[in-house]
Amino acid sequence: MQASNFQLRSSGSPWLEPWLASAGFRVATHSGYFSGELGGLGLSRLKCRLQCSQLWQSTSLLHNQKEKDRYSCIDQSTSYLHVQSLRNFPTEKLRGEVVVVRLDSALLLGHSRTCTFARERALLTIKYLYKARAKVVIVTSWDTVLQSDNPEIKSIDSFADYLSSLLQLQVIPVDGAPGLTSFKKEKWVQNNIILFENLLSFRGEVANCNDFSQKLASGATIFVNDSFSLSHKILASTVGITCFCYASLAGFHFEEELKRLIKITDTTRRPYIAIIGGSNFLRKAPALRMLISLCDGLFFVGKLSFQIMNGLGMSVPSQFIERNAIMEVLQIIQVARDRNVPIYYPTDLGCLNNNDSGTLGVINSTGQLDGWTPADIGPSTLEKLSSIIPLYKKILWIGPTNYDLAEEFSDGATQLGQILEKASFDSCEVIVVGNAACNTLRQNVDSSSRYIEFRNATVVWEFLKGRILPGIAALDKHYPYRIPWSSVFCDPTLPLVVDIGSGNGLFLFQMAKSYESSNFLGLEMNEKLVIRCLEGMASDEKRNLYFVSTNATSTFHSIVSSYPGRLTLVTVQCPIPDFNKEQNRWRMVRRMLVEAITDLLRTNGQILQLPLQVYLQSDVESVLVGMKGQFLSYSKGQLVVDGDDGGHRMENPFGVVSNWERHVLARGAPMYRMLRKV
């Protein structure tokens, strides 16, 4: 058969860039948009080991090898943050596909200035998909009790009408259980948009029920998450649904919020101070340890300040002390001393008279509080903040300044907002977290001010604690760094062979020695195995072999597409089967991987004097059959099976066996193999 010649496309879309720019959105000109240094001193969990901007220059092979490790091994605790985005997904693959979009109804129903910006990003996701001729299905949830006075959400019909008015496109509501099985497809005319019923009406949503997730995804092939505020939750509409879609992407709003979240741990702008309020020191201790390692100063307010003052040996009323957090407080103070990081606390407090609830007084923070209830920070503390803030280039305000009283006693927060407003105009980067802080700035800051806002503080706290956010982790991964091929290989123009799931690398080590006229790349999820392979290359002067730690199923295209030479052979050997779940037996080979290989593989290329393109093998025949089925379904008819007699018992064409293959043959068991060629 005659194979099509695919031309590699850029990550952006030619018609998208001017459209986004005209809408006021900055267009990413390269795929590695999550650049910047993630972390500071002591950031063992949030510091990325790979910094692609630092090219190694030394002629020492050992030094070169250590630098190669930096390109290959990403800390697994941060790699999940690099996700595939709708912006970088090929638009031609959206046409005619059913795409489920998880929206955040709070963005659509909010009326603040910042909500308006976020709403525009969320609506842009829908409009983008519609323009790409995708069939869009919207899933979301709204609280009919808390927002009972909102006419837009009285029913799914009214909410669909509201969405139609925002999008200027027709949105068709579908009553009953979510899923396209109950939808009459004759109604789906002229590429209209579908809205499913309120997800809060179904217990399977919160339970992340597998059956409910499958119903949500029924008929759909692509999932787009644009509900960043739910990233810390495990829901069927944000996590479970990704198991049933071949591509799971971040929408425009989700992508922007994730970039902003990562900025919290970016220490490029220094000095950096965090103003931390609220209560429950023990629960926040992991995040506070993270902040003390990131920041150049900490200012504690609210009930947290009492814990710090107590740890410093000051007199604090016993009812305000969290006795179960004393050890954590002392640890924070010790780290601050070791790093020479100043810790600030209120010098005075605005207090409410217990005998006269309408009387407010100012009490020294180290004075006697008998008969008074702390309400907020006092004027002396605000003066101190006003003098300290100009010394810093970056400010994080997370948590309320008051002491669990009503907002009417939050005058200190209002004045702090004014101080930060001035700082934001003085080229200081301001990040505000939590409803209380955001509402304060909303009252003071006009539309020309520049600050980053997170209303859902839980997402930020969980992130700072070093915990993996399920909503982010469920999305497909993107390899965020461009590999310097000319440094990795002696000749980056040679034909490239990629082994997916390279394991201990013995197969590629032998192949690289036997076939010096080609370059070999191993993609392996196990970081320890990759490090071991790179260490084994230290004495190799030929440099036609390299390894990368990554999940190739979703990152294959972003890694290999930048290679300057030809991709001529891809091998997948002995993926680990899961016999408990039939659908997982060959889950390494999925539609996304098959399409990426098909798009990049030059079908007229030859290697080793053999017209090979894809080589699959396993010692479990059902696994091989599954992988074969994926290629037959999604290779766009470009590749056919070479000599397929249905037995899958062909000989190894390379004369080189993998480690597991040698083990299987040694015990007399068969290996099942298949080639794909033009």
Image: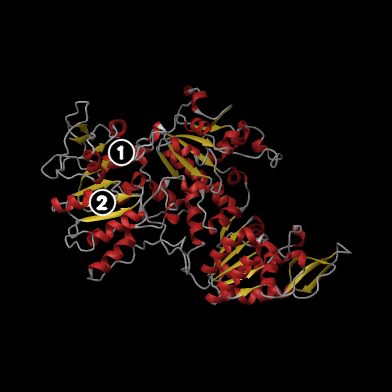
Q: Residue at x 18, y 49 (%)?
A: 511
Between 162 and 335, the one lying in front of the other is 335
Pointer 2: what residue?
A: 505
Looking at the rendered image, the disc whose residue lies closer to the viewer, 1 or 2, is 2
Q: Are marks 1 and 2 in contact (CB under 8 Å)?
A: no
The quadrant in which residue 345 appears is bottom right
Residue 482: % across, % down = 32, 57
Left or right of 286? Residue 71 is left
The secondary element bearing badge 2 is classed as loop
Callout 1: 10 Å neighbours few (<14), some, many (20+)? many
Between 631 and 35, the one lying in front of the other is 631
Residue 401: % across, % down = 69, 64
In the displayed structure, would residue 641 be above or below residue 658?
A: above
Pointer 1: what residue?
A: 594
- The reply to whether residue 41 is visible in this rendering is yes
Residue 513: % across, % down = 15, 53
- Residue that sits furthest to the right in the current view: 355
Q: Earlier in the sequence, mark 1 or mark 2?
A: 2
Q: What's the mark number on residue 418?
A: none
Left or right of 448? Residue 412 is right
The quadrant in which residue 103 appears is top right
